Image (cartoon, rainbow, N blue to C red):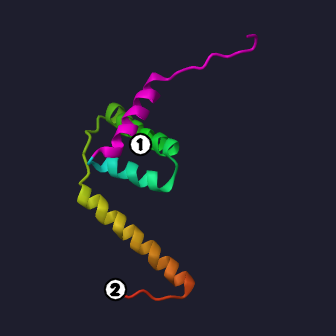
Amino acid sequence: MPGHVPKVFNRAAQALKQAASSARTDKSFIGASHRARLARMDTACAIKATAHQLARLIYAMLTKGQPYVAQDMNEYEAKSRDRQLRALQRKATKLGVRLVAA
């Protein structure tokens, strides 16, 4: 076919996307952040975003010599809960409603 350009495959991107896809069942910070992305966006975008997160971690480890430090799941969930609570308080204030702790 004249003018046909063959598709170029990036093996690193494929590997990162495969790792991101399997992070869905992982009980780690990366798995939790991937599941949170899946709740916000479609599967392909969430996999791509998680692959990008993995690429940033790998780049920092290779270029800066930084070790990988696994974040604590309880800490991640607490931060996520605090973010959700602040967002809910902002929405309530915007609507003129006052929230009371239960």
Q: Is 6 above or below relative to 65? A: above
Nearer the observer, 66 or 71: 71
Q: Are marks 1 and 2 in contact (CB under 8 Å)?
A: no
Say left or right for 27 vs 45: left
Q: Residues within 10 Å of mark 2 (few under 14, many from 20)?
A: few
The magenta segment: 1-26
> What's under tag 1, amino acid-wise?
Gln
> What's under tag 2, amino acid-wise?
Ala
The local secondary structure at tag 1 comes to helix
x and y percentages locating residue 13 in the rendered image: 46, 29
Q: CA distance from mark 1 to mark 2?
A: 35 Å
x and y percentages locating residue 49 in the rendered image: 47, 44
x and y percentages locating residue 3 in the rendered image: 75, 14
Mark 1 or 2, nearer chain start: 1
Q: Is 40 above or below relative to 19? A: below
Question: Badge 1 is on which residue?
Answer: 53
Residue at image location 33% in from the left, 31% down from the top: 62
Residue at image location 47% in from the left, 46% down from the top: 46
Residue at image location 39% in from the left, 48% down from the top: 34
Say left or right for 63 vs 10: left
